[in-house]
Amino acid sequence: MKIVEVYWQDAQSQDGWVSIEEAVNDSLPMIRTVGYLLKETKELIVVTMQLDTKNDKTSMVMTIPRAWIKRIKRLKP
């Protein structure tokens, strides 16, 4: 299974009162996710951080829309 590092831009929200200036000038965070590549389509990728290969299970699964992805780097095991 391929190990990848995904660079992607995430959505952001704020809770609580902020000025309109702060709200419109907020920037989107750039995220780096490292894990095992489970699925790759034109619309999305699915990466997991934990695998239980004995029982064919996974945990900590992240589905990222392709439109949000800036770069995918294949890593060597």
Image: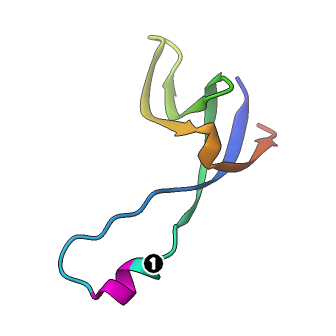
Callout 1: few (<14), some (14-19), or many (20+) C-alpha neighbours within 10 Å? Answer: few
Magenta region, residue range: 19-23
Q: Name the foreground residue: 52 vs 29.
A: 29
Residue occupying the point 47% across, 82% down: 25
Instruction: Judge whether residue 31 is colored magenta.
Output: no
Residue matched to label 1: 26
Q: Name the foreground residue: 64 vs 26.
A: 26
- Secondary structure mostly seen in the magenta stretch: helix
- Where residue 17 sits: x, y (%)? 19, 81
Does residue 39 sit above or below 25 in this rendering?
above
Residue type at mark 1?
A: Asp
Residue occupying the point 66% across, 23% down: 41
Residue occupying the point 37% across, 86% down: 22
Q: Name the foreground residue: 27 vs 20.
A: 20
Does residue 8 sit above or below 22 in this rendering?
above
Image check: 75 left or right of 20?
A: right
Residue 59 image-quadrant placement: top left
Residue 15 image-quadrant placement: bottom left
Name the image quarter holding the N terminus.
top right
Name the image quarter holding the C terminus.
top right
- Where residue 63 sits: x, y (%)? 50, 34
Q: Name the foreground residue: 51 vs 25.
A: 25
- Where residue 13 sits: x, y (%)? 34, 64
* Secondary structure of the residue carrying numbered label 1: loop
Q: How many marks?
A: 1
